[in-house]
Amino acid sequence: MTVPARGAGLPMVLLSHRGPVSFGRDRSGRTASRGAGGLVTALSGLVSDLPDAVWVCAASSEEDAAVAAEHGGRAVAVTLDGEPRLLDPEAAAEEARAVRVRLVEVDPQAHDDFYTVIANPLLWFLQHGMYGLALAPQLTKREHAAWNDGYVAVNRRFADAVAEEVEARGGRALVMLHDYHFYLVAREVRERCPEALISFFLHIPWPGPDAWRVLPPAWREQVLKGLLGNDVVAFHTEGFARNFLLSAQELLGLPVDLDAMTVQVGDRRVAARHYPISIDVAAIRELAATPEVAEHAAALTETFCDADRQLVLRVDRTDPSKNIVRGFEAFATMLEDHPELAGRVSFLALLQPSRQDVPEYADYLAEIGATVARVNAAHGREGWAPIDLRLAEDLAMAVAAYQVCDVLMVNALADGMNLVAKEAVVVNDRDGVLALSENTGAHQELGAFAVTLYPFDIQQQADALHAALTMPRDLRRARRQAAAAVVEENDIAKWLNAQLSDLGVDLEAGR
Ligand code: F6P
């Protein structure tokens, strides 16, 4: 066992940039909304099941900052059962499933440098292989300042908050850190709290050593040495875990063992592991059974699907890594190659605007709009537009669209996992075909039941879409059922329990 299974009995301190709850204000006063996504669902359940757990996250709104300030920067207690609500400290002691959340306020300029200059263009683009390198990235005075005053400073701020929570628990805790925002935290926490058991989970790809040479040597060493402060560094796939070890070997000259999947750091051995994240199957099926979803599904069916018409769907954040523009080009190519499909196949794109304060993301959203206008002008006709672009965040609508689509297109350039693919296969009831990029973590589990997409090859994607739309019904059904069975087996509980069990945490026994 190379993972240190000594988490039994330890209180838990969790860190992620987005937290389980965010506060706002409307005419009636303070409002609270639940953080979106499977990760929040899984970890909220965990934190509320454990008596002395705390979730550290960024104060992401003015009202979050106000709540934090009112509590002297200490953790607040919230309930996430039903409508989320802030609990007063007395009530929190009574409430069995209260979640303790420490909202960390960060200087806005430092946060901007951390999030919109370093984490979300630079690290995100580097790790998803999105730089052409001839002209980008350009690491100027601005980026150097943003690294030091933004990324490093914000990591230190969160490391302090995490270390304070560990110290408040006697210096012994299981610390679970999440994602590329916080590569530098573990090393600092370990220095202050040597008895803590520290694990890190990365939700995006980890590329091979050469990709990291885009960063100045001092930065990439900080990233790697920061991560090597953990006991366990975990990824979605074995390939990402191996790339991490090879990066430590090549860029830091450390000895690695690719059989045991460990790297030696002085007298410590750090384990690289992989646990493919998943979805809460019961929760999404529960949502799929609501009247709201049924209403949307009926409307979508009437608009897009009957015996003679088919629907291609995509559901994504407007992130350049999702490869939305090439997806539309591929659809247009298919219409050119198969003019008989005009008026008979539509492409519904449910897209959530994302990270619009990062210029690369704002430009990409503009490019998406321009591409849709171009394709619709070239291929549309009276009463039929080939692409229906809807910009909104509406989970009920997305689930309804998953149910009725004939093909779900996921053609990401690179994606740590891709949960849209997993959600769609468990709720679709039209024998829908999954058209899935080979560069997603999900392809390892679902590729055998999908039509594989090569994300840079527009002609191949056009041909693959056509193959999916013309696939015999019984094959469609068999593949969708097989894919759903894989997701049912490997759900979010399995993802979490595998990590906890490797760390020695037994939830059944209270810990
Ligand atoms: O995939 C990484 C991730 O952090 C996800 O966990 C999350 O859904 C997504 O990116 C959204 O990012 P942001 O918090 O920047 O909107």
Image (spheres, rainbow, N blue to C red):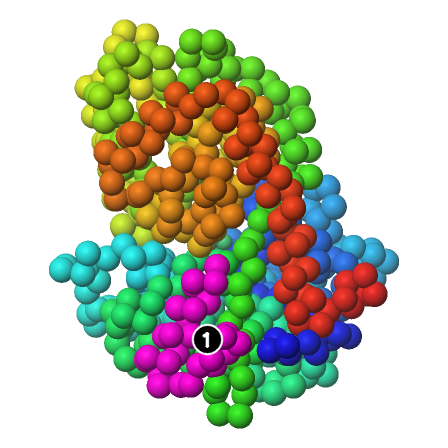
Relative vertical location of residue 33 with respect to residue 253 in this rendering, above or below: above
Magenta residue check for 461: no
Q: SS at mark 1?
A: loop
Placement of the N terminus among the 4 image quadrants:
bottom right
Residue at 64%, 42% in the rendered image: 488
Residue at 42%, 23% in the rendered image: 471
Residue at 83%, 56% in the rendered image: 96
Hey, which quadrant is residue 437 in on the image? top left
Q: How many marks?
A: 1
Q: Is residue 500 visible?
A: yes
Relative vertical location of residue 89 with respect to residue 405 in this rendering, above or below: below
Residue 133 on image: x %, y %: 18, 61
Magenta residue check for 239: yes
Hey, which quadrant is residue 192 in on the image? bottom right
Hey, which quadrant is residue 46 in on the image? bottom right
Residue at 63%, 29% in the rendered image: 288
Relative vertical location of residue 339 with respect to residue 38 in this rendering, above or below: above
Q: Identity of the amino acid at label 1?
A: Leu
Residue furthest top as drawn: 382
Label 1, residues with CA under 10 Å away: few <14, some 14-19, many ≥20: few
Placement of the C terminus among the 4 image quadrants:
bottom right
Residue 206 on image: x %, y %: 40, 64
| Residue corresponding to mark 1 | 258
Residue 19 on image: x %, y %: 58, 56
Residue furthest bottom as drawn: 267
Q: Which residues are magenta?
A: 237-263
